[in-house]
Image (cartoon, grey):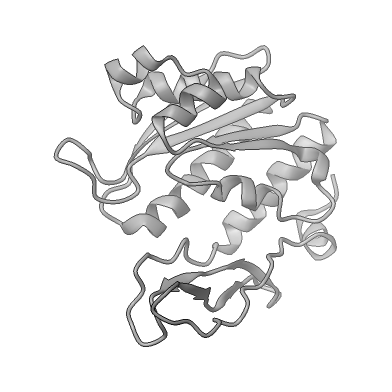
């Protein structure tokens, strides 16, 4: 595997830069915002803010803050390992809403390292797309260890990936029984027992929780490829 520094210059993580915010009126939202930059000054992950019009405050939070350099390097290292070993990855995401799949497909030259991603935000989607039993969801709730494991194993079973990672949690404030920042992860890999992690990130905001989820996802994928 080539040195990370050289690899970063050859295939650095890029994003499609956010377009300038279009003129909007009361009939529809516009999107746009500043793009985050990596250490080379190239855009990494654009930050989007949806507003009712240009003079009002955002009605949703920024998707995620700038990705730290060390985390960008870890993402690249994960893709290099998966590509070199011909062990493609897959994701099954709830609270991250496809963010992980977006990041793992944002590096030029590593198309073979990522196989597919599922965004299963609703309970119905978890059942229909991943085969998570409805009675399991009823008994434990969508944010739980059993459901995270079922999501990961369903994604692995329904894909051509070597390893599939699931994430389900509360990225922001929820109901009375919903702990803000509680996230369950699971990683299912061929020929290995399914790994699970439970994290309590706290009330750090939706962007903070999603950013923390990226780091855990990278850790679990790397553990699965050891």
Which of 191 and 153 lies nearest the eye of the viewer? Answer: 153
Instruction: Give coordinates of residue 211: x percent, y percent.
Output: 46, 54
The residue shown at (54%, 81%) is 21
Which of 138 and 13 lies nearest the eye of the viewer? Answer: 138
The answer to whether residue 47 is above or below residue 78 is below
**Residue furthest toward the left?**
176
Considering the image in quadrants, where does the C terminus appear? top right
Q: Is residue 211 visible?
A: yes
Q: Quadrant of residue 121?
A: top left
Instruction: Give coordinates of residue 74: x percent, y percent.
Output: 63, 49
Which of 59 and 47 lies nearest the eye of the viewer? Answer: 59
The residue shown at (71%, 64%) is 14
The answer to whether residue 21 is above or below residue 102 is below
Q: Is residue 208 left or right of residue 86?
A: left
Considering the image in quadrants, where does the N terminus appear? top right
Q: Quadrant of residue 36?
A: bottom right
Instruction: Give coordinates of residue 198: x percent, y percent.
Output: 37, 31
Instruction: Give coordinates of residue 161: x percent, y percent.
Output: 72, 26
Q: Is residue 152 visible?
A: no
**Residue furthest toward the front?**
27
The answer to whether residue 178 is above or below residue 33 is above
Q: Is residue 148 left or right of residue 72?
A: left
The residue shown at (55%, 50%) is 99
The residue shown at (61%, 28%) is 164
């Amino acid at each position: 595997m080539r040195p990370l520094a050289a690899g970063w210059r050859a295939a650095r993580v890029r994003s499609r830069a956010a377009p300038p915010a279009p003129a909007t009126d009361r009939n529809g939202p516009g999107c746009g915002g500043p793009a985050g930059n990596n250490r080379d000054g190239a855009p990494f992950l654009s930050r989007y803010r949806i507003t009712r019009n240009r003079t009002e405050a955002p009605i949703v939070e920024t998707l995620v803050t700038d990705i730290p350099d060390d985390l960008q390097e870890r993402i690249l290292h994960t893709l290099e390992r998966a590509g070199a070993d011909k062990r493609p990855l897959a994701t099954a995401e709830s609270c991250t809403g496809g963010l992980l799949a977006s990041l793992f497909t944002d590096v030029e030259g590593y198309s073979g390292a990522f196989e597919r991603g599922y965004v299963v935000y609703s309970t119905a989607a978890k059942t229909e797309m991943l085969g998570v039993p409805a009675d399991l969801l009823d008994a434990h709730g969508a944010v739980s260890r059993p459901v995270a494991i079922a999501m990961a194993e369903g994604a692995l079973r329904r894909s051509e990936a070597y390893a599939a990672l699931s994430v389900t949690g509360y990225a922001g404030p929820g109901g009375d029984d919903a702990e803000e920042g509680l996230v369950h992860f699971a990683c299912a890999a061929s020929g290995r027992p399914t790994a699970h992690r439970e994290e309590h990130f706290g009330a750090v905001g939706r962007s903070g929780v999603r950013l923390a989820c990226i780091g855990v996802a990278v850790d679990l994928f790397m553990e699965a490829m050891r």
